[in-house]
Amino acid sequence: MTENPADHQSERLPLTAAQRGIWFAQQLDADNPNYQIGQYLDLRGGIEPRLMRIAMTKVVADLDALSLRFADDDGEPYGVLRRPAPGDDVLHVEDLRGLGESAFDAARSRMDAEMLRPRDLRGKELFGAILFLLSDDRALFFQRVHHILLDGYSAVIALRYLSEVYTRLSKRAPSGRLLDAMAGPIARIAARVPSPLPSLDELHDDIAEYEASPQREADHAFWTEALADEAAVEGLEGVSGSVATTVVRVAVPLDRERTERLAALGRDLPKTVVGIVALYLAKVTGEQRVSLGLPVTARRGKVAKSTPSMLSSILPLRIDVASAATIADTIAHAGDVVRGAVTHQRFRVEDVDGAPRHAGPSVNLLPVIDALRFGDASGQVQVLSTGPVHDLSIVLSGLSSDAADAQLQLEGDAELHSEESLGEHAERLLALLDDALADPTGLTVAGAGIVGDDEAAALIEQGVGTQAGIERQTVLEAFAAVVRERPDDTAVVGDDGTMTFATLDADATRLAQHLVREGVRPGSRVAVRIERSVLLPMLVLAVLRAGGAYVPLDPEYPIGRVAGMIEDSEPALLLTSSGQLERDRAAGAAWTVPTLAVDADTSAWRRGGESVPCPRSATTTWPTWSSPPVRPDGRRASPSAASRCATSSSTTGPRCSTPLPSGWGARPGSPTPPGSPSTRLGTRCSGSAPATSCT
């Protein structure tokens, strides 16, 4: 029967902020196995399984974090300690020596299977360890642990402590049959040796001291200012809204020359790698300010740095990548950003109002882990997983270490990435890194390339096709021609349905008529903020037909940025959807611009209304004004500067399509001729009949 930690009320321990985040995230995604971290040691030399069992049990008992069990009261989580007894066996041993050369592959397959199993946060399997015996002088020690117990920094502490305990035991313990007889007493004696590491109680006292300190206030002020300016969170292949359920990984070994060049950077390595990744992301996305994630230990002081637990976080880095800047300038700027973030790393960024849920692709520089000694054996650490992946994690490891091969590993959400795409990004990123290090002061951001000559030639070749002359025409004229030729063909496909050209044409005309009735005039700005749906192209067409200027407001933009855009553009009307309107209101939208939810069944534009007069003549190349339109600067516009009325009806008559550039109209104070297109543009006219209706 599974032990219920809730039965032990007096031993409750609080969770760190990082642990609480993991708890609630895993509860919402219970079947996701990627909230685990995993490593294995490739041990060369003789390993005594009985001593390894004793050592592993002592390590779990000595490290409070590994003895934790979790429960909750009404959704509020807490932890209790359940230390193993000296005689308990927490290490599983698998003897694969009979498999010969296939033993390693069998062990790795078992590790992968273990990492793919989701773990119940209330259960006993949050930590697991297996010793695979491959031969008499080679073994693999595998350790997996749920992220709620340990972060990657702490997992290395646990491995180092295990090597120390095993090595001490191996120097004093007997061997052979005598070890079999003495295993119990040896385990009890080892258990009486106190742990050299701080307890979780000491860690929580240290955290409480920080929370009440002036340093915490200074950290809060720093991050509030750092996150005040918006930055688009974009990935190399899009953005994922949650932790990856399936992760694809590609590892590219670094040759000796690259390894030595990077290792020679020393303390400049972090800012250089972050700067180059920011440059690459800017090149791919077209953004001049990019957002990256920087995993940090979130530790300051002796207690935090020596207590195994879950404290780490991913800090958002906002990095400017100006096209005129040199690579050296970009790297220097990245260094300033990294230094500021690391200095204030202990603060939980999610405590800042409006902090992003996702920082962007993360750049993880794994620390050098030298070979660990286990008695007469030694082993190098191999990282299987660093924990949850949001979109993409770029991991650089093995530099300046004789125990591991240097490599660049990309871990991506399988919904966005494939092994092929990750491999291509890795090769391009390394090529950009080579170019940047070769001439950091002479190469500019604009001059840096991420596409090789061969790849560029192939891409250009794909775009070569038959050349055909295209008659110069307005967007509305081109659309009307398609409507006439293919009215019943599908024009728009979206998650919410489809729309034919005829339906798109009719709805756009109906909405344009409504916009004119609402006061939209040539040059009036009409904002559109709506999710990607079949309505979006219809709204754009309607704005153009009404003579307005289309102002796009990306639904992904935060409320603050949208409010600023509305203030700057001063639109006459905002077109949106009911769902987007509710989301904006829930997020605190306070703008006062007149707003129309176009998808509402009761929306006025669907019901129609009084017909809007339109000009009688729709065939002349220049509308009937008393004088040509006037620019905002007071100069007359030439006839070629204005659009023209053209016969472009898809059904019953000519359409007047005369959108003007924003701000153009009659000279201030001059009369506007009745029925002039300067006041009614983009509407359908009834041919030569008197101006009666625009449909």
Image (cartoon, rainbow, N blue to C red):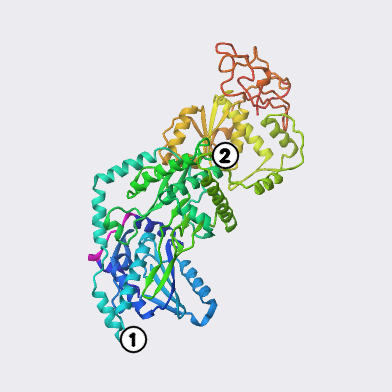
Q: Is residue 640 left or right of residue 672?
A: right
Determine the image quadrant of residue 317. top left
Residue located 34% across and 56% down the image: 311
The residue wearing badge 2 is 447
Q: Is residue 200 left or right of residue 555?
A: left
Q: Where is residue 580 in the image (x, y as percent from the top left)?
A: 49, 41
The residue wearing badge 1 is 180
Residue 422's label in the rendered image is: none
Q: Where is residue 80 in the image (x, y as percent from the top left)?
A: 28, 66
Determine the image quadrant of residue 78. bottom left
Q: Is residue 10 magenta?
A: yes
**Badge 2 local density, few (<14 within 10 Å), some, or many (20+)?**
few
Q: Distance between the residues labelled 2 and 1?
A: 69 Å
Report the amino acid beneath label 2.
Answer: Gly
Instruction: Examine the rendered structure and indicate whether residue 171 appears above or below residue 159.
Output: below
Instruction: Examine the rendered structure and indicate whether residue 642 appears above or below residue 164.
Output: above
Q: Does the magenta stretch include residue 196?
A: no
N-terminal label among 2 and 1:
1
Q: Is residue 665 left or right of residue 33?
A: right
Q: What is the secondary structure assignment of the residue under circle 2?
A: loop
Report the amino acid beneath label 1.
Answer: Asp
Q: Is residue 418 visible?
A: yes
